[in-house]
Image: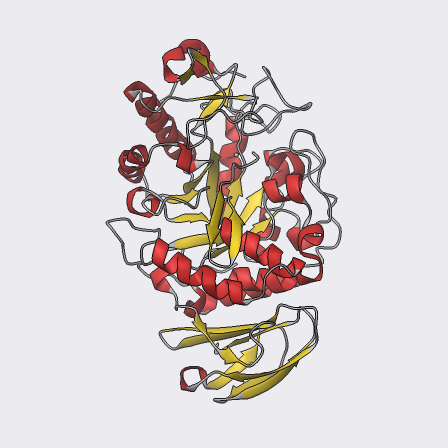
């Protein structure tokens, strides 16, 4: 759903911050190398997470059928692409009261225990999970804990679960306690009620037990009190270690209570500004310093140029990034977090997928398949690119054109990567000084050549050209 964004002023720039009734709960490519991930503040990430790439699947738009079967048929192709984690947008029935558009928002949940009949049945979803697991792909469910539809099962049976604003039910409230008017199709839940907390915990446990999912992407996680997340995490992990992604960026304590990853909204806004000429690559240095101070050591962020909100509400990758799209996707895969591919990007998606209507992807020739496959393969084999403490820190490589060229290296356990991007509209010849840390022999990830990196090197890059060198 359209995310609430706060205005946040920091240093050189302004950042705009940035988703059939059921019975009651019943009883219950080649595998990438993994290592045990150190914990921070008592919280473990699953050992497969540091090298993972997420792929967001909009079930409604992913195939002509718009259902689970249409997703399952393409899982072998996603495995070839190198996808590790399949994030499935909300699968629940959508409310009819105050519905937006013809089909409504997937983030307007009517019944947390049920499946949207347009997508299939519970057995169909279980089959999708099994198909993914057979390909060693994890499944992350999109979860909407802050609100439900106005005609939700819970609202009818348990009205005490809901927030009252000036004596009546209300649309969601922002972090200042004010109604969010354009979220008119959903009704706010009250986490001051212990019964609601218990019910939410139980239903999230249900999907792990029933379908063997591997994690949750949590919609608007910051509008739910952090002390709820602190009690939820052990309740989920008692069944199976979970991968938890927060759609939020303003609460560093999320990493201490529940979440392994949060959203890199600031990264997204800055990269769009660089393409638009509003900021230079130096803004990435400022951002990196800020993030490293704001979050606990070992944090992960999710980096992307497209997701369901960006695509539906703000524009396609071509509209938002133009000729710079490939360069910034390279950056998303190599910087310091976990990258996201939104469905259709591997096909060069140039269509805004409807949020409240069906506008299926028109799959063609998968023009960007090789591009993403190379990046995924690199993340799997080169530990320098893994997230958090499992990977190497971003180390800037000095150059004499830092207002145009962004260059850095990462090193971990002898694995090394050098990334050089021309983030400008000008052809630029640059002198770089990798230093002794990054000297040595490298393969060109996007070519067949090899390179002997010395303490100083000169390159000429076309506008928005990128090059990635890997020691393995």
The scheme the figure's colours follow is secondary structure
Residue 397 location (% of width, % of height): 48, 77
Residue 342 location (% of width, % of height): 60, 48
Vertical comparison of 14 with 1: above or below: below
Vertical comparison of 133 with 359: above or below: below
State the quadrant of the N terminus.
top right
Residue 151 location (% of width, % of height): 52, 14
- Quarter location, residue 423: bottom right
Answer with left or right where residue 201 lies relative to residue 356. left
> Total label count?
0
Vertical comparison of 154 with 225: above or below: above
In the picture as drawn, the residue positioned furthest to the left comes out as 42
In this orientation, which residue lies closer to the viewer: 321 or 284?
Answer: 284
Residue 314 location (% of width, % of height): 65, 43
In this orientation, which residue lies closer to the viewer: 13 or 297?
Answer: 13
Answer with left or right where residue 317 lies relative to residue 171. right
- Quarter location, residue 443: bottom right
Q: Is residue 135 visible?
A: no
Q: Is residue 406 visible?
A: yes
Q: Residue at x 37, y 60 (%)?
A: 292
In this orientation, which residue lies closer to the viewer: 155 or 120?
Answer: 155
Vertical comparison of 257 with 458: above or below: above
Q: Residue at x 37, y 17 (%)?
A: 161
């Amino acid at each position: 759903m359209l995310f609430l964004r706060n205005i946040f002023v920091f240093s050189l720039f302004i950042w705009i911050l940035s988703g059939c009734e059921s019975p009651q709960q019943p009883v219950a490519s080649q595998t990438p190398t993994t290592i045990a991930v150190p914990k921070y503040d008592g919280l473990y990430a699953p050992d497969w997470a540091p090298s993972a790439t997420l792929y967001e699947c909009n079930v409604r738009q992913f195939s002509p059928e718009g259902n689970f079967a249409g997703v399952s048929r393409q899982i072998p192709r996603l495995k070839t692409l190198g996808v590790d984690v399949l994030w499935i947008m909300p699968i629940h029935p959508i409310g009819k009261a105050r519905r937006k558009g013809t089909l409504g928002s997937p983030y307007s949940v009517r019944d947390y225990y049920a499946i949207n009949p347009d997508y299939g049945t519970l057995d169909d979803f279980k089959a999708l999970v099994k198909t993914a697991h057979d390909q060693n792909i994890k499944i992350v469910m999109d979860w909407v804990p802050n609100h439900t539809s106005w005609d939700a099962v819970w609202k009818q049976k348990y009205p005490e679960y809901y927030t009252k604003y000036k004596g009546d039910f209300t649309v969601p409230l922002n972090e200042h306690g004010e109604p969010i008017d354009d979220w008119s199709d959903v009704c706010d839940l009250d986490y001051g009620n212990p019964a609601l907390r218990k019910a939410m915990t139980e239903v999230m446990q249900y999907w792990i037990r029933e379908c063997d999912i591997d994690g949750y992407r949590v919609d608007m996680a910051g509008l739910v009190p952090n002390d709820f997340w602190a009690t939820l995490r052990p309740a989920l992990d008692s069944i199976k270690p979970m991968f938890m992604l927060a759609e939020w960026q303003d609460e560093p304590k999320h990493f201490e209570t529940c979440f392994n990853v949060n959203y890199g909204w600031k990264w997204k806004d800055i990269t769009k500004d660089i393409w638009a000429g509003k900021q230079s690559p130096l803004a990435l240095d400022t951002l990196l310093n800020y993030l490293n101070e704001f979050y606990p050591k070992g944090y992960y962020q999710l980096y992307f140029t497209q997701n369901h909100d960006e695509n539906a509400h703000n524009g396609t990758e071509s509209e938002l990034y133009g000729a710079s799209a490939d360069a910034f996707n390279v950056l998303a895969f190599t910087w310091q977090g976990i990258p996201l591919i939104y469905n259709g990007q591997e096909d060069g998606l140039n269509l805004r997928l409807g949020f409240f209507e069906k506008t299926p992807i028109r799959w063609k020739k998968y023009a960007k398949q090789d591009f993403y496959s190379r990046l995924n393969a690199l993340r799997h084999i080169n530990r320098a690119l893994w997230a958090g403490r499992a990977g190497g820190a971003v180390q800037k490589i000095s150059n004499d054109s830092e207002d145009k060229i962004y260059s850095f290296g990462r090193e971990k356990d002898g694995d090394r990567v050098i990334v050089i991007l021309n983030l400008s509209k000008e052809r630029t010849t640059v002198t770089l000084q990798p230093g002794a840390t990054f000297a040595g022999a490298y393969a060109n990830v996007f070519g067949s050549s090899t390179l002997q990196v010395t303490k100083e090197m000169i390159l000429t890059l076309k506008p928005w050209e990128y090059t990635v060198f890997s020691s393995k």
